[in-house]
Amino acid sequence: MTIVTRGFDSGVVLRLDREHGVYFPGDTLSGQFYLEGISRTELGGAELSVLWFTEGKGTSDLGIHAVWRFQPEECPLDWRWPQRFSTIIPRAPWSYEGFLIKIRWVVRLRILLRGKSDLICQVPFKVGNLPPLTLA
Amino acid sequence: MGRGRRWFPFFVKKRGEHRTISARLALWLECGIFALILAAGLIGLGFLVSRIIRLYSPPQEGFLPVWAKVLKKEVQEHYSGEGPLYEPRILAEYHLGDKQFQAWITPKHAPLGTALLSERKAADRVLRKFQIGEYRLVYVNPAEPLKAELLGEIPWWTALIAFIPISLIVLGGSGLILALLHGRNDRGPFLRSWLPQKRRSPPMEDGTAGHLWPTIPRPLSPQESPGVRLAIRLPARPVGLAGTLISLLACMLWNALSLTLAAWSGMSWWLWRADWSFFAFSLSLVLIGFFFAILLLRHILRQWAVGITIMEISDQPLRPGERYQLYLAQFGSVRVNRLSISLVCEERAVFREGTETRIEVRQVQKLPLFRREAFLIRSGVPFEAFFDLELPPRVMHSFVSAHNQIAWALMLEEVIPGMPIVRRYFPVIVFPPFSGRVLT
């Protein structure tokens, strides 16, 4: 599963290795990201997180499972080449499609640009394979 | 009441999720305002009651109560710089010892005891309550037998005045209790010290620590709540004890006040031919209180008088696809039309609407487990049943976060003739399946 986010003259590519995007607790979630058209001088940093959040009637809650922060000074990599990441899927919460509450999982990448607004792209995936609820 | 709700939101002005003043200060101020309202109500009611008592008390120590016959009534005019004033008077005849006396008496016609009225019509209205030839109770000074005083009457609108301090007492008292309970739910700093601390999660049965399941509530272990027939006895969800207690106190207060008022007005109507409309009005207050008491009694009966329910389960937490045994014991002395047990899943969402915090609950899944119809439960002999629960393989686990919750519970529904359906909930915790994967 690949998501590409582009600004006017730059872009972010975030890709999960598993195409169907369904994971179970204990599975390894892995993927890669790279940047296009962003020079080192304008790159302020990057933050990649694996998180769940709730949607629906209630106020949204959020839980961060894993997070990686990249600073250009500390991590002198060429980000035009794919940067890999991986983590183990936790046992809970599972993705859920209810009436008042929906639980979503995403991999979110935030690119901080100097002098420009941040670039954010996220790839949704599912934990578990619960069917959506239907009205009884 | 949802978390974070305040009766006076200006104390904790919200900007989105941010608050500008501490919740502790807000709670203190809230309690202070309700305490002030309560104090104002108590002072107002005390003032009113003292005026009424003074109205019905003998004018001075040593005055004797005697029955007097009304011979004549008239309105006497007095002239002052601001215009005429009118004094209603009655000529009363009474006996003190073996002597007969006649005296002009001015009735008190208000709790404040004013004697002179600025309007002629008002004075006539006072005198209309006295009939020539009827007997009234008057207080006479034995030292000066011609000095007599007539007891006053409570005008009907006194009850309306009484509503102001009573409302303040009810508002202030209930608000204070709710604010303190709210503070308890919020676990504010000043209450936290004397509240029991939250249970810390011990290691789970699979060897992992409880904190590895931050979004799943911790289930009761057999050591914490042992059962008699099966491993674990499930506690019932509380049924709003605080609300019932507050309603009970309010009901008792209302009925005590309205009965006292009715007794006073009835006595004054019967003894001194006071205004019958005031007595009728106070009786209507008693009827409202009686209706309120019946509603409350029905509620209490529904919750507690049916008899206790015991629910035990062979194991916890529940896992999708696994089978468990359940034991039910229903006590009481009642004929039951239908008793059923279901496993239900509820979604609870807390959200904000303006400055209010609201909660919405929706039952999204229901799995019938047990049903029995038309039977009798005898006193001391509980209805008992064993039955199985097989959790479907593809169900959501229990989940809790700050504003959202997915909760599972065993729901008992009891249909009893002449009563609303009794529902009791026994929360259970559902974990994800052992293997992590579920059957498709």
Image (cartoon, coloured by chain):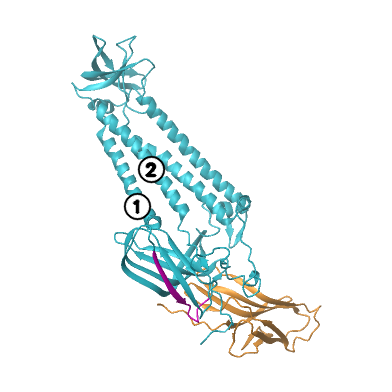
Q: Marks 1 and 2: in contact by CB < 8 Å?
A: no
In the rendered image, residue B410, in percent from the top left (x then y), is placed at 45, 69
Mark 1 or mark 2, which is nearer the start of the sequence? 2
> Any mark on residue B295, and which?
1
Of circles 2 and 1, the one toward us is 1
Q: Amino acid at mark 1?
A: Leu
Of residues A37 and B227, the one nearer the viewer is B227
> Is residue B322 shown to the viewer in this render?
yes
> Any mark on residue B254, and which?
2
Q: Is residue B159 left or right of residue B404?
A: left
Mark 2 and mark 1, same subunit? yes
The magenta region covers: B383-396
Residue A79 quadrant: bottom right
Crowd class of label 2 (few under 14; some 14 to 19; many from 20; radius 10 Å): many
| Residues at marks 2 and 1, CA–CA distance in whole angstroms | 14 Å
For the colour cyan, the matching chain is: B
Of residues B40 and B244, the one nearer the viewer is B244
Of all residues, the one furthest to the left in this rendering is B133
The colour applied to the residues of chain A in this rendering is orange
The chain letter under disc 1 is B
Q: Amino acid at mark 2?
A: Trp
In the rendered image, residue B251, in percent from the top left (x then y), is placed at 39, 46
